[in-house]
Image: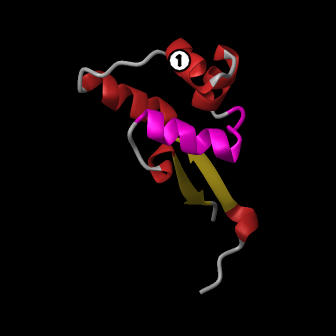
Amino acid sequence: MKRDLNKMKLIPRIKWVLLEREEEGNKMTQDQIAKSLDVKPQSVSSWVQGKTFPKVETLFKLAVLLNCKVDNLYKIEWEE
C-alpha cells in the first residue's frame, strides 16, 4: 500500500531523549548541546519545541552526542 507523503508528520522526540538521559544520570543542557554542536542555544530550543529542524549533518552529530539513533530523535505519524 502506497502512503501519501503529504500526510506524513515528523514529530520531534529530542526532549524525550534528553529526559531519558537525565533519568540515567547523564543530564545534558541545551546550552551544552549548542556548544558541542557549535550552534546557538536558541537553535537547540527550537528543535526541542519542534519549531525548526536541524540540518541533516547536525542531526547526525546530535545523535552521536546523545548516543542514540537518528530515529530516536524524531518519529513519523501519519494523518488520516
Question: Can you see residue 13?
Answer: no
Q: Residue furthest bottom?
A: 1
User: 15 or 79: which is nearer to us?
Assistant: 15
| 62 relative to 6 in the view: left or right | left
User: 77 or 22: which is nearer to us?
Assistant: 22
Quadrant (top left, top right, bottom left, bottom right) of the N terminus: bottom right
Q: Is residue 77 magenta?
A: no
The image shows residue 26 at horizontal and vertical percentages of 30, 22
| 54 relative to 62 in the view: left or right | right
The image shows residue 67 at horizontal and vertical percentages of 38, 39
The image shows residue 38 at horizontal and vertical percentages of 65, 22
Prevalent SS, magenta region: helix
The image shows residue 21 at horizontal and vertical percentages of 33, 28
In this view, 50 is above or below 22 = below
In this view, 20 is above or below 3 = above
Quadrant (top left, top right, bottom left, bottom right) of the C terminus: bottom right
- Which image quadrant is residue 35 in? top right
Q: Residue at x 65, y 54 (%)?
A: 9
Q: Residue at x 26, y 24 (%)?
A: 23
Local packing at callout 1 (Cα closer than 10 Å; few below 14, some 14-19, many 20+) is some
Q: Residue at x 53, y 21 (%)?
A: 33
Range covered by the magenta-colored residues: 51-66
Q: Which residue is tagged 1?
A: 30
Q: Is residue 58 magenta?
A: yes
Secondary element at tag 1: helix
User: 33 or 10: which is nearer to us?
Assistant: 33
Q: Residue furthest right?
A: 6
Q: Residue furthest left?
A: 24
- Which image quadrant is residue 61 in? top right
The amino acid at mark 1 is Gln
Q: Residue at x 64, y 15 (%)?
A: 41
